[in-house]
Image: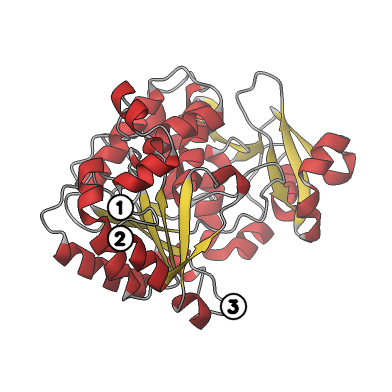
Amino acid sequence: MFKTKIFRANPKYKLVPYENLTPTHQNNLSQLRADPDFFGVLLPNENSGLTIKAICHQTAQLYKNLQYPGKIPKEIISSLGEETNTTIKKLLLDGILELQTEKGFVSGAEVCSIFEPEKDLTNNGNKLSQLSIKAIEYAEKLNITDVTKLSARLYFYNRFPLSTKRNQAFSNQKDTLKYLNLHPQGKYYHLLEKYWEPVKPPNKYGDYWSIWQSTYNHKSIQKKQWRYKLYISTNIESQKEILGEVIGILSETETHSLKFAKQMSGLLRADNFIAYFNTLESLQNTAKKLASAFANIPGQGVPFTAEITSGGLLSWGMDPPRDKYHPNWQEKESWRLWITNRLASAIIAAKSHKNTDLKPGKFALKRLSLEGIDTTNWIPSISLLNSYE
């Protein structure tokens, strides 16, 4: 697709090797030095709308080669192989490379129409697909230019509001756990005591999540780590109704660990109860049992997850791909945070491109799809799933 096209390196970036970075930048990226493929960064010009990017030697060499307009070097195409088109698309949409067109050199949202015809953002798929599109449409209307803040709006979309009445009635963790019958004297606590052992959460999550690990399944898993997550999402009234039976079913399956919110604000989130598995097959088998037991329970629905039951009660995700260029200062991303961070970054980037009618949400979906996500049903691609095998 791109073999005969003319490209150039985006002049709004400056290529800087790690050794030439400021001490602050070097500190933030210090862990990447262990990777022999790491080169340095592309630093954007001020007010360019671009973001700093850590890059490998191959990308750096391509950027150097295209300081003057030309074709993609044959050796780069040969080394990328089947990934050539996808890789070049990413570099174009991220603004690292620019493509020559009748209108001049373009990148980012301005180049999207060259790949494929534009599609309507409206999604007629399942409930969670529609919910995810609504979250993106909401986010693109916000006047937010900070990726972290916009990502948070996407991440927490579809949580119920915390009313003054509820806030007063459940002012502390004990009140919430008592409501759920999961306090030490509660009728469901014996299930946790019998089949699970508590896990001390990281300090920042200590007041938010109650985390438990199977007393059996974690011993049978040695070097492998749980990777797949099952979301059980319903309203706060139904949570109290089904929670005991949910824990009972999970206790008899290959569930590795589980967590649930222990503050009222957490229970109002869409992703308030999550179970973890080492294999997708184990997750699917457990989901079948839960779906059969709770066929009439309404689903709240977790955006940016793959729907299992039609009402959104059950859905799934996985650990995100390992990002070898993950800066020290960035928090390790969960599945949904990995998605919302990328969506937020793409939405903000698209808004900086004035010479296009493409909506930021459409651009964000196109960019995310290149990472191996089916943005119709929010299912990871086979390549992402196989990356853990």
Q: Nearer the viewer, residue 176 or 364?
A: 176
Quadrant hosting residue 79: bottom right
- Residue occupying image coordinates x 60% and y 61%: 80
Say above or below: 354 vs 272: above
**Residue 250 in picture, x, y percent from top left:** 32, 68
**Residue 90 in picture, x, y percent from top left:** 54, 45
Residue pointed to by mark 2: 188
- Residue occupying image coordinates x 42% and y 38%: 155
Say above or below: 214 vs 199: below
**Residue 140 in picture, x, y percent from top left:** 40, 25
Mark positioned earlier in the residue sequence (1 or 2): 1
Contact? badges 1 and 2 (CB < 8 Å): yes
Secondary structure of residue under mark 1: loop
Residue pointed to by mark 1: 181
Amino acid under disc 2:
Tyr
Residue pointed to by mark 3: 223
Secondary structure of residue under mark 3: loop
